[in-house]
Image: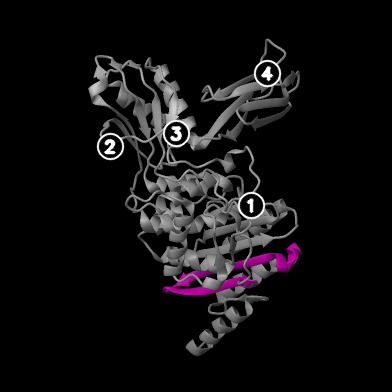
Amino acid sequence: MTTNKISMTFVLAFSLCYSVVSFAAATDGGNALGKQIEKVVTQSKIPRGELSLMVSYIDNQKSETVYELNCEQKKIPASISKLATAGAVLDQFPPGHKFKTVLGLDADKVSGETYSGDLYLKGGGDPSFVSENMWFLINQFERNQIKKIKGSIIVDDLLFDSVRFDESRQENRVDRAYDAPVGAMSFNWNSVNIFVRPDQSGKKPKVFLDPDVEIFTVDNRAQQNESDKTDIFVERKGSQIIVSGTIGKKSKEFVAYKNIQDPAEWSGRNLKLFLKQRGIVVEGEVKAGVMPKSMKIVAEYESKAIEGILADMNKFSNNYVAEMLTKNLSISGDDIGTLKKGMGKINEYLARIKLPKDQYYLINPSGLTRENKMSAKAMTYFLEVIHKDFKVFPEFLVSLPISGVDGTLKKRMRNEPAERWVRAKTGYLTGVVSLAGYAGRADGRVFQFAFIFNGGTDEARIRNFFDKILNTLID
């Protein structure tokens, strides 16, 4: 086939992709794969208007299209929006970048084992600060040999604005961990773990909170039975944890994850609890405030590297991490982090890599909104840009769930041809299913793909349909 004929084929394909199917004709292999995918699409009987699909691969730095259907139709992408966020984060923060969390005090108020001033906890916007990191911070502090703090714990989370739930998220607040609030000083994903386990010697199951801080009260309405069946419900209403339903005496422990309300108070209360567990008494309360520059830093924790934080975001589709990173993107000089400015940075990045302007509209970095819009063509192009950039591609790829192995793809494509051959980001909202990333083949080719569904079909059926396309592509 001549070069002119190949060019004409691609012009035709891109002009038609808005409403009909087209395959790559540049190679016999690409054409055959496109026909096989079209067979899967036809057999699925899913309304074509509810789909936006595209598959491509890079050959000698040129994009070759394998399959496309309605590829320019903008649809709600859900959590595959996080891929754009990850790209912008890697563009601004180099591999190895870390965030700092510190403890500070007035050294002049230390006398022997007693400190008569306030202890300051200052957040550096670390989305990954968890219990192990708090222990590291306290272990450092303990070496100052202070056993009594007469003042209060002052939490400084002013690196970000005070907006906990950005208006770009879906309107209705829920108590589940995926809707956690955001703050520059945050802890344990701003969620509390609730464990319910049967009590062999009693009639009611036991309820445990982790961490068990003095913020929550537990209303245990649950009962237990003699079976191995569990039907437990956990709800957070304000500061009350309500546990209801039944659990069998032979059942395994049940766990639920609920978000908290105030990240600063949550972080400070946990610091106070962890200090107490190490024999360090804080007589005062937990308050919000500003750490003066004159304070001496007596303990410091550096976060895991940025690539590890991106893996937390993408492998488990963590909305909280996405918004935390976006606020970090917006910080410049003395400016505080805001989600609006961070989204501006993400959209500036997408414009710089020349993502087609008419193919996307993003206002929220996590995809927890129905306002975001993106086409399969735009997402596939984005993935091609990342694929060609060796400075960021390895870290980006490692952050994605692996089919049949981990993250949100742990149970998908297991024991199928695509197991371990797909690294991709999932997306779900009511009536929305999406999947975008990379698929490899034994012949060495690596494909970019973007599948977006908006409609009323059973969501499990759509997930299986997407997986079948990938099994066809790889087998």
Furthest toward the top, the residue is 201
Q: Is residue 83 left or right of residue 118?
A: right
Q: Nearer the viewer, mark 3 or mark 2?
A: 2
Marks 3 and 2 in Cβ contact (< 8 Å): no
**Camera sees residue 445:** no
Pointer 2 or 4: first along the chain: 4
**Camera sees residue 234:** yes
Q: Which residue is mark 1?
A: 428
Pointer 3 or 4: first along the chain: 3
Measured Cα–Cα span from mark 1 to mark 3: 26 Å
Residue 228: % across, % down: 72, 24
Query: For residue 241, which quarter of the picture?
Result: top right
Magenta-drawn segment: 43-71
Residue 50 within the magenta-colored segment of the rendering: yes
Q: Which residue is mark 2?
A: 293
Marks 2 and 4 in Cβ contact (< 8 Å): no
Q: Nearer the viewer, residue 67 or 303?
A: 303
Q: Look at label 3 and name its amino acid.
A: Val
Q: Which residue is mark 4?
A: 205
Q: Look at label 4 and name its amino acid.
A: Pro
Q: Does dot 3 land on a helix, a strand or a loop? A: loop
Query: For residue 173, which quarter of the picture?
Result: top right
Q: Look at label 2 and name its amino acid.
A: Lys
**Residue, x 42% and y 68% (percent of image)?**
352
Q: Does dot 4 land on a helix, a strand or a loop? A: loop
